[in-house]
C-alpha cells in the first residue's frame, strides 16, 4: 500500500485509544483498508470505540468468517461454547432454529456442521436480518418465534438463541464503547435479564419435539432461575454451560417425552 501509514503508527494510535489487542487490530485494519486514506479513516473510527467488525465488515466466529454490518450486534467468543454444543446436539438431517439470529452467527455454525439439516433464524431488526441473509442464513423477520412457519411446530431438534439477557439495571456496567455503539435491543434483558428468556422458554414447547433441545445464553447468576423455568416447561437433563474459567455461558435442556 503506497504511502500507507507506518504500521507502528497504527498500533500506537490504537494503544493510545485503549485498545487492548492493538497489534492484532492494526493487522486487521491494514488488511481491510483499500488505500492509505481509507486506513486513516478506519483508524479514526476505531479510536472512537466503534466496533472493529463494523469497520472491517467481518469477524471470526467458531473459525468461520462472518459479515457484520454497522448497527448489527457483534457476536462474541463467549457465545462459541453455546454454538458448538448446539451443533453437537443437532442431527445431520435435523431441524434447528436460531432465535434472535443477529448476523446469523449461530445459524451459520449449525449449517456448517450439518449441511443437510434445515436451519432457520428469526430476527426483529431488518438490518440484522439482511446481514444474516448475506451470510447465507434463511431468516424469518419478527420477534422471537412469532415469524416461524406453523409447519415447524413440534419438529425442531434444536432451538437455540443468544437473546438479550443483561439486567436493565446493570446496563450501565457494560463497557462504554458497547453502550455507545451497539444496539440496546440486543442487550437489554429487562428485569433480572429474564424478560425475553422467560418468554422464549414458555413458548418453546410449541416448536421443540419431545427429545429435542432448547439452548440459551445466560450470564451472571441466572442459571437457577432459568433452570426452574425449563423444568416448569417440561425440560430435563439440564446442562449448565461454563467456560474454562468457570463463568456461566449458557444452559441447555432436553424436552421430556
Image: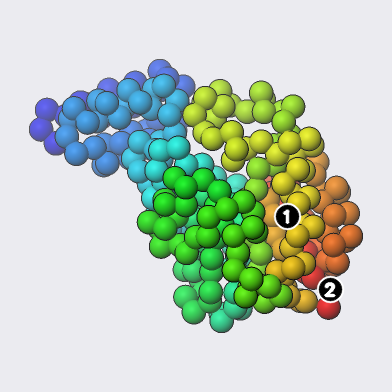
Is 252 placed above or below 118 here? above
Q: Residue 99: where, in percent of width, then height?
A: 61, 56
Q: Which residue is drawn at 42% across and 52% down?
A: 130
Q: How many marks?
A: 2
Q: Where does label 1 land, which residue?
A: 200
The image quarter in which residue 21 lies: top left
Image-based side of 229 in relation to 89, left or right = right
Q: Where does label 2 land, which residue?
A: 256
Is 121 placed above or below 242 here? below
Residue 71 visible, this orientation:
yes
Q: How far apart are marks 1 and 2 (CA)?
A: 17 Å
Q: What element carries label 1?
A: helix
Q: Residue 192: where, in percent of width, then height?
A: 79, 37
Q: Nearer the viewer, residue 194 or 63?
A: 194
Image-based side of 243 in relation to 21, left or right = right
Q: Residue 218: where, in percent of width, then height?
A: 71, 47
Given contact means CB atoms under 8 Å apart, are the residues at marks 1 and 2 in contact?
no
The scheme the figure's colours follow is rainbow
Amino acid at each position: 500500500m503506497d504511502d500507507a501509514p507506518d504500521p507502528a503508527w497504527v498500533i500506537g494510535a490504537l494503544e493510545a485509544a485503549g485498545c487492548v489487542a492493538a497489534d492484532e487490530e492494526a493487522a486487521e485494519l491494514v488488511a481491510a483498508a483499500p488505500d492509505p486514506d481509507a486506513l486513516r479513516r478506519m483508524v479514526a473510527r476505531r479510536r472512537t470505540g466503534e466496533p472493529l467488525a463494523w469497520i472491517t465488515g467481518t469477524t471470526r466466529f467458531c473459525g468461520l468468517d462472518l459479515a457484520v454490518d454497522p448497527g448489527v450486534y457483534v457476536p462474541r467468543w463467549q457465545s462459541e461454547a453455546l454454538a458448538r454444543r448446539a451443533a453437537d446436539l443437532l442431527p445431520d438431517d435435523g431441524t434447528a432454529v436460531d432465535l434472535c439470529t443477529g448476523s446469523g452467527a449461530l445459524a451459520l455454525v449449525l449449517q456448517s456442521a450439518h449441511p443437510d439439516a434445515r436451519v432457520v433464524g428469526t430476527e426483529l431488526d431488518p438490518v440484522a436480518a439482511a446481514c444474516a441473509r448475506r451470510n447465507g442464513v434463511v431468516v424469518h423477520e419478527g420477534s422471537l418465534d412469532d415469524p416461524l412457519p406453523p409447519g415447524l411446530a413440534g419438529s425442531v431438534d434444536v432451538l437455540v438463541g443468544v437473546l438479550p439477557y443483561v439486567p436493565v439495571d446493570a446496563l450501565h456496567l457494560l463497557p462504554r464503547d458497547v453502550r455507545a455503539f451497539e444496539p440496546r435491543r440486543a442487550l437489554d434483558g429487562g428485569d433480572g435479564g429474564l424478560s425475553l428468556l422467560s418468554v422464549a422458554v414458555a413458548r418453546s414447547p410449541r416448536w421443540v419435539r419431545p427429545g429435542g433441545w432448547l439452548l440459551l445464553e445466560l450470564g451472571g447468576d441466572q442459571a437457577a432461575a432459568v433452570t426452574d423455568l425449563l423444568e416448569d416447561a417440561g425440560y430435563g437433563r439440564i446442562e449448565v454451560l461454563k467456560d474454562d474459567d468457570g463463568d456461566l455461558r449458557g444452559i441447555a435442556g432436553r424436552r421430556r417425552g
